[in-house]
Each structure stands twice: as C-alpha cells, then as structure tokens.
Amino acid sequence: MRTKAMFIGLLVAGMTVLAGCNDDDANIELTSANQTGATPADNQGSTPGRGDSADGVEGVDEAFVGPALQTEPAELDRSLNCTAFEHPDKPPVLLVHGTTVTGTEQFTTFYTPQLVALGFDVCIVTYPDRGLGDMQVSAEYVVHALRTIHAQTGRKIAMIGHSQGGVMPRWAIKYWPSARAAVADFVMLAGVNHGTDVALPAAVADSLTTFLGIDRFPVGFAPAVTYQFARSSNFVAALNAGDETPGEIDYTALYTLYDELVRPVVVPEPTAALEYEQGNPKVANILLQDICPGHVSEHFVIGTADSLAFALALDAISNDGPANVERAGGASALCGLLPVDIAQIVMPGSAVGLLDVVASTLREPEIGPNLTASEPPLMPYAQQPARP
C-alpha cells in the first residue's frame, strides 16, 4: 500500500494546496506572453516545421537548423505568463512547474511574490496536460518561453524548476542552441535528472484505480511521462549522454534526504545531482540536510514553500556561479530560517486534497492523461548527437 501511495506522489509531484487557482486568483499580476510586447518576429522559431533560429541570442550559429517545434505558436504564447519587464538590473526568472499542476497553481503564492518583492521580473510557463504527456513535447514550451523572454528583455534568464520542471528543461537546453544560449542559471529543485527507482510505470494504472477510484485506464497503460521517469528510460539515457551541463550555464541541484519520490537520494549517488563529485565549477549539488541536518523537507515542500531551498535558489540567480552555501549566509543563518508549516501543507487533510485534485484533473475532458503502453519513442533529433 505504501508503495502505491508513493506512486501517486510521483504523479502529484509539484502539487501544492493552491491547486485550482488561476491567473485571476494570483496575488501578483501576470499577463500572457502576447500581451507583453512580443511581435510575430519574436515567435518565428515557434512556427511548426521551422527549425531553430538565433532569436537575437549571441553565440548561436544562425546556420544551424535545429528541431522544428511542432506546437502551434498561439498555444505556445498562451502557455507563458509574465509580470511586467521592469527590472533590467536583474535576470528575468522563468519558473517551471512539476507534474499534475499548472505553473500558476504551483508558483503564485510563495515563489512569485517573494521574487517580485526582491525586484525580479517573473515568468511562469505551463506545459500541456499537467505534465502527464511526453516530456519531449513539453520541452517545446520551455524553448518558446526562453526565446520569448530573451527577445523581449535582451537579458539572459534564470530558470527555476521543480521535479519534472527540474529535468525536462534540460532537454530544451540540450537540443535547442537558442534556448541554451538564453539561460544564465538553472536551479533544479528535486529534479528527476537520472530517473527514479521508486516504482515501475506499469503499476501506475493500478495505483490510480486503488487510491482514486478511477477505472477507465486500460490494463497495461499509464501516462506517458511515467515511463520517461524510469532510470532505465530512453529519455533519461539520451538526456544524460555526453555533457550533462552544456552551455555557459550555472547549474544548481537542490535535493532532500526525505524525498520519497526522486530516489536514490544518496546511494550510490543522488539521482537528482548532475556530474556528481566531478569538480565542475559551474555545478553545485546540495543536499539540504548536509547544511541543516534537522531540516525536514520532502518532495512537495522543497519545490513549493521551502525557505532553505528558496534562499539557495536566490543566491544562485543573484550571483555569478551556482549556489554557494557560505555566500548565502552559511549554516548558522540558513538553518535559522523560519520553516514552513509542513502539517498545513501535506499532513494529513491536505494530502487528501491533493489526491482529490489529481482525480479531478484526470477526469477533466480537456486534460489528456496521455495513456500509453510504453515509453514514447525518441524524437529523430534525439537519436543523433546534440549539436554543441
């Protein structure tokens, strides 16, 4: 029973008690991308059938024809919501949500208000079907978001993502030079960087019917993304082939000992880490409990309302290089941060609410559960080495 509960958790990765809110509910005004000054020329690279374009990003080989985005430009525009671009002294921040939520559900109460108060311009991207589909498709939304923000601001972007949002954008960075060149920092909160060994995707359907009373999943079928989360998936293998940290980007991987979903956390090495213990100066792999041994934060909290994770993310996007514990205040200051009330967020009544949201999400006719009997095939561009 506990194993099945953990599997449901994989599908609700990134969920918060805010589930169900929309832009009208947010306490920070967000506008869609096409209301912030974008021009048709800004979105040229998003036209189905077109390859990659420089989008004004320095260092991109304009002769390179990269993967064509298959998603309609209007849909890509709708997926991106931003505050006004009013702070040229700081990098704009792109927030990328986890599975089964939308970006506004996850980020408009904790991350966005704090970042705005600190003088950052903030954008939130929401990819399709609450992340239940093919991550190769979801990555196109991140590509478009990065291109659009860079075109409108002329600045490199700091990206913060949780769970699926901490791994799927790496696909965009790996295969689209214009996306890669537009990013200065990427902070991953419990990113499933090398897959998880929590359970097998084939068990998802049974878990959902057991806990949520959903009986419409055919036997042997599960949401497409769950196959890609497996440590043995083709997606994970392609993503991590070659350079795990391409581009002039600082990477910060934050993870917690109490993550019940993204495992292994420590042995033989953290699956959430990148280039673990390889001495890469542009990478910081930080286990929160190495700083504060008594810090209690599990998979949901680290990506939603964890003050320690936020402080480290803020240090990363505010300075050169990845997050630095001492620069952020050291253990004496960081461990004294006011923790969130975990009981109010995930125990026990709220946890029931999370499952209710998952159930209602899967029943919504406009939300596709993306059921499949196997992992989605790799896109043709991923079957050959990515362009440096």
Image (spheres, rainbow, N blue to C red):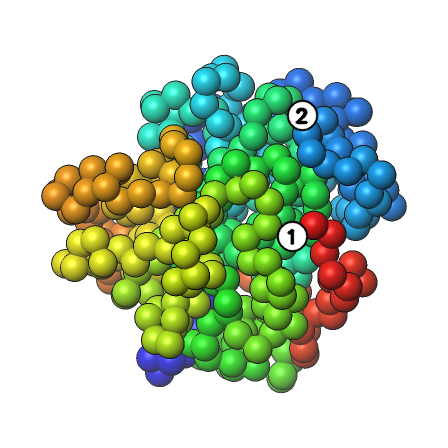
Q: Please name the amino acid that badge 1 sits on.
A: Lys
Q: How many other residues sit within 10 Å of disc 1, few (<14), some (14-19) or many (≥20)?
A: many
The residue that disc 2 covers is 151
Residue 295 picture location, percent across and down: 19, 56
Quadrant position of residue 74: top right
Q: Is residue 127 left or right of residue 184?
A: right
Residue 275 picture location, percent across and down: 47, 61
User: What residue sits 57% from the left and 77% below the top?
Assistant: 232
Would you say residue 358 is visible in this rendering? no
Q: Secondary structure at mark 2?
A: helix
Quadrant position of residue 243: bottom right
Check the picture and name the quadrant holding the N terminus. bottom left
Q: Please name the amino acid that badge 2 sits on.
A: Ala
The one nearer the camera, 59 or 72, is 59
The residue that disc 1 covers is 174
Q: Is residue 266 above or below residue 280?
A: below
The one nearer the camera, 339 or 192, is 192
Residue 87 picture location, percent across and down: 47, 17
